[in-house]
Amino acid sequence: MKISFIGLGAMGYPMAGHLARDHGLTVWNRTGEPAERHAAEFGSVVAETLEECAEAEIVVTVLPTSEVVESVVDKLLPRLKKGTLWIDSTSGDPVSSRRTGKRLAEKGIRFIDAPVTGGVPGALAGNLTVMVGGASEDYVQAGAILKSFGSRIVHVGETGAGHAVKAANNALLATNMWAAAECLVTLRKLGIDLKSALEVINSGSGRSYASEELLPSRILDGEWPLSFRLSLHEKDIRIAEAMSRSEKVSSPLLSLTTQLYTAAMRNLPSDADYVEVVKFAAKMNGEKW
Ligand code: NDP
């Protein structure tokens, strides 16, 4: 079975590495260097052109946005074979994925949205959680591929449902992160030691992924690695807010979180990591992290 993998960024590179161990894999990246490095490290084959990826029976995309996925679909569509399964593991927009699924279905090509959660550590370890939107039979076939980099693979509904759940997950992450930042700034202003405060919070009912896994190393140890660009996280929150609006759900907290993240993104460097949003929350209060 021929598999093409498009997009060897922070997530795609290790995900494709797991796939290359289990299957023959052709890779393509917009800039060539990661693809050459991948071939050297994992034995994958570098596609000469993007269009060559259309020869596969399975196409996997891990790209920044659904807009980019749609531009890749435009290029491959004339060459894709009937029966091909397209697995989109981008954190995308459900409206766009339903549009793409429909376009591909008109040519007999199947499409599932299969975004992931677990971050770069999960991608490196191959234990991501994958949420799949699409037809049951396509979910079953995709499972054989997804299990290379995912340890929990959940069918959440029809096309677009995977992207919807992913956007909701990341909106929750953002809300928790911002709330934790406000509380920690307050505690610091009160002169309370943040190491002790986090120890209590993280064994108490106020804990979250942000307070347990993300904030201690940044705030206490001053380590600010780049693993997930803030601009990508901001995109996910905007998708969640748009979903909420289209369903006429009253969601003031989601709207406010979107506003805060957009402001943070505009005020921080363009390559800021998503956790750096707490620097902006601190700056709003005359503090520095
Ligand atoms: P990166 O920015 O590290 O990688 C993006 C990839 O897309 C690169 O391969 C890049 O190529 C390629 N790309 C960018 N623009 C284009 C374009 N116009 N045409 C073709 N290729 C393009 O992003 P991540 O790997 O972090 O994220 C990928 C997806 O996964 C996003 O949707 C993100 O939201 C999601 N995600 C990220 C997580 C993380 O922790 N990083 C966790 C879970 C999901 P090039 O190398 O040439 O720039």
Image (spheres, grey):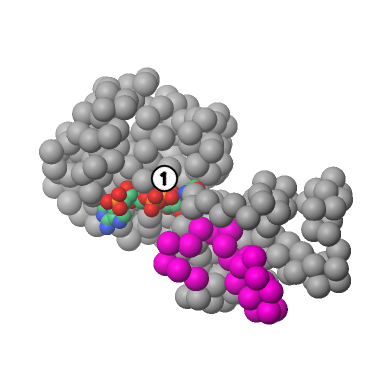
Residue 288 located within the stretch drawn in magenta: yes
Q: Which residue is mark 1?
A: 10
Task: Identify the residue shown where x is 48% and y is 62%.
Answer: 272
Q: Quadrant of residue 171?
A: bottom right
Answer with left or right where residue 157 lies relative to residue 112.
Answer: right
Q: How many marks?
A: 1
Name the residue type under label 1: Ala
Looking at this rendering, what residue extends furthest in the top direction? 22
Q: Nearer the viewer, residue 171 or 160?
A: 171
Which range is magenta? Answer: 268-289
Answer with left or right where residue 185 lies relative to residue 172.
Answer: right
Judged from the image, the secondary structure of the residue bearing numbered disc 1 is loop
When the figure is inspected, residue 200 is found, relative to residue 257, above or below; the finding is: above
User: Mark 1: is the Cβ under 8 angstroms from ligand 1?
Assistant: yes
Answer with left or right where residue 184 lies relative to residue 114.
Answer: right
Task: Identify the residue shown where x is 53% and y is 44%.
Answer: 119
